[in-house]
Amino acid sequence: MSYKKSVYIKAKEILAQRKAAAEREAEMRHSAAVVLCPEILNIEREMASHGADVVKAVGMGADVTEYIRNLSEANLKAQAKRKELLKSVGFPEDYLDVKYTCEMCKDTGYNNEFYCQCYRKLIRDVARENLGVNSPVKKCTFDSFRVDRYPDVIDGVIGINQREHMKSVYQYCMDYAENFTPDSQGLFMYGKTGLGKTHLSLAIANEVINRGYDVYYGSVQTIMDKLEAEHFGRLPREDSIKDDVLECDLLIIDDLGTEFTTQFTNAELYNIINSRILSSLPTVISTNLSIEEVAERYSQRVASRIIGASMSVYFCGKDIRQME
Ligand SMILES: [Zn+2]
């Protein structure tokens, strides 16, 4: 697991809130129940005294095993009595139990000193939320990608069947995500607009997050806007993204070529791509530009940096958004 620290902190906060809410609700139910059935308090006093007796017995150094067994039997009896009592006044017998979101770990996040499943899931959810400022990341999965939307015709550029080619692309991206490590190479996804590049790059993000890696996703314009604001001190420090962009396990830059080009954006883009290559960290780039257009727009140097460090993945077909 290599999520950012803030992800763990946020997940822990949510767990603590769940736990506190569950306990608060149990307390409120308790207050209501004792009004109708004050005898509950007597039973609870009895239960509390059992606990105190155990402590005393241990202190006396007596043969406590037998003693403790008797007490815990008495305790079970008291609990059963309390349940009966609750039932007799019309409450469900578990009315006073704390109803945790996760019964396995009682909302502590730990189960026998291991991370509980609920905590792992929460961490992934938080990481995913951090990802998608406005991106429909949850919807864009491999399962929701439909290869049959691509035309069953020969593609003019690559000379092979478009649907068959996109099947391979789909399979390639799925394998990429399933086998992802921060040592993986980058991907350069290119092809016309509306051919599913964003969908597959988000599906990769989803899967890679599920596998415990730290992913940063953004359209090139959003990333550049934030970096520029940060550079000129207009971004609060806690919103700083520079380290995320440079150091995350997987960076996904969507829609390369749609940004408003300035000297700043060109320099930053080169810096990001180059720094990540030097640290051997992969970047997935998607663009509507062809390889030649990337070279024209950014320089041969940038194009060869990108292409050289990535697997080029060509998207073909008709705009699938218009076919929906
Ligand atoms: Zn749990």
Image (spheres, rainbow, N blue to C red):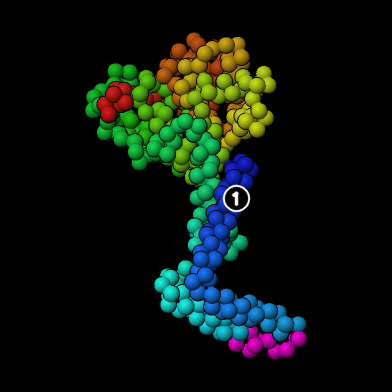
Q: Is residue 280 visible?
A: no
Residue at 56% from the left image edge and 59% from the top image edge: 24
Is 36 rendered above or below residue 136? below
In this rendering, the answer to whether 261 lies above or below 144 is: above
Given residues 108 and 241, the one toward you in this image is 108
Q: Quadrant of residue 299?
A: top right
The residue positioned 46% from the left and 70% from the top of the image is 94
User: Magenta residues?
Assistant: 60-70
Q: Position of residue 151 (x, y in %)?
A: 25, 26
Q: Secondary structure at mark 1?
A: helix
Nearest to the observer: residue 248 or residue 99: 99
Name which residue lies at 67% across and 30% down. Answer: 237
Q: Main secondary structure of the magenta part?
A: helix
What is the quadrant of the C terminus in the image?
top left
Residue pictured at 46% horizontal, 41% vertical? 207
Amino acid type, label 1: Lys
User: Could you tell me residue 134's position as x and y percent?
Assistant: 47, 30
